[in-house]
Image (cartoon, rainbow, N blue to C red):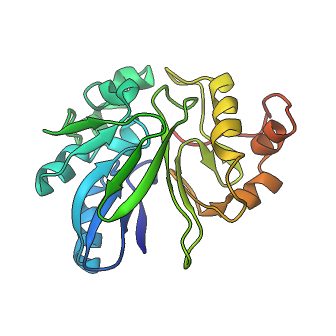
């Protein structure tokens, strides 16, 4: 399997391209602010043909390049229905203006083809299998994507802004909820195998085992305690 990732734009949001191998079809995850050029460079480098864009949530730092990327390759975008409005109204999603300079660079709106994600759904795209888990807390429509373990590689978990290396996503923006975040961590993350590779929306790669041992939020959820006061990350 091939996973090509890069941090994009003002918020350093991780965009991923996932394919069975170089020269094959691929899925693009979270093409955010100023990600379109990086996507095109990765497609050319690995000779990939995109078949879909899938989104962990609707914040502008994860969806800002959806319209140009989907339009350039005539592919659909998948998003949870509770976050769909954010593609057309990013400022409402943040509860404040994100700033005129950035807004001047964005193509706000939906691509021509939008499909909605549901909890527990299985997506078969580009010869790959993704299981979808609704994981509210950062936003109401946040989701994660998990790929199954194979004989050659461990399971891969695209956590969006649910779980980071050493931290979690913020919960103080519209639609955020610490109660929901802790529930999602317990329900979605804790059951995963320690060997599961975590590719998050911001920051470096980690594993569930590493986060189970060191992440203050996951440790306290596992212990059945309340919210940690450790710093949170993401937009």
Q: Quadrant of the N terminus?
A: bottom left
Q: Say left or right for 144 vs 192.
A: left
List x then y, in percent, for residue 210.
Answer: 75, 60
Q: Is residue 140 above or below residue 202?
A: above
Q: Is residue 88 above or below residue 66?
A: above
Q: How many marks?
A: 0
Q: Is residue 15 visible?
A: no
Q: Say left or right for 79 vs 214.
A: left
Residue at figure coordinates x 40%, y 70% from the top left:
4
Residue at figure coordinates x 20%, y 32% from the top left:
109
Residue at figure coordinates x 12%, y 52% from the top left:
74
Q: Is residue 74 visible?
A: yes
List x then y, in percent, for residue 161.
Answer: 54, 43
- Give the quarter of the image for residue 37: bottom left
Residue at figure coordinates x 22%, y 34% from the top left:
108
Q: Say left or right for 19 vs 104.
A: right
List x then y, in percent, for residue 107.
Answer: 19, 39
Q: Is residue 119 above or below residue 155?
A: above
């Amino acid at each position: 399997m091939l996973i090509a990732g890069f941090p994009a734009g003002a918020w350093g949001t991780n965009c991923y391209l996932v394919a069975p191998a170089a020269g094959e079809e691929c899925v693009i995850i979270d093409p955010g602010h100023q990600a379109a050029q990086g996507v095109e460079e990765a497609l050319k480098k690995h000779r990939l043909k995109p078949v879909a864009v899938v989104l962990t949530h609707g914040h502008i730092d994860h969806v800002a390049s959806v319209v140009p990327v989907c339009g350039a390759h005539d592919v659909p975008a998948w998003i949870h229905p509770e976050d769909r409005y954010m593609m057309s109204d990013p400022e409402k999603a943040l509860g404040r203006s994100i700033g005129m300079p950035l807004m001047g660079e964005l193509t706000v709106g939906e691509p021509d083809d939008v499909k909605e994600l549901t909890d527990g759904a299985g997506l078969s795209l580009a010869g790959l299998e993704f299981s979808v888990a609704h994981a509210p807390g950062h936003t109401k429509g946040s989701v994660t994507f998990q790929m199954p373990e194979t004989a050659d590689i461990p399971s891969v978990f695209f956590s969006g802004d649910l779980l980071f290396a050493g931290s979690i996503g913020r919960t103080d923006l519209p639609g955020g909820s610490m109660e929901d975040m802790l529930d999602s961590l317990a329900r979605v993350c804790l059951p995963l195998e320690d060997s599961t590779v975590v590719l998050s929306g911001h920051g470096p790669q980690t594993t569930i085992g590493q986060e189970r041992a060191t992440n203050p939020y996951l440790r306290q959820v596992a212990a059945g305690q309340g919210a940690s006061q450790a710093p949170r990350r993401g937009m």
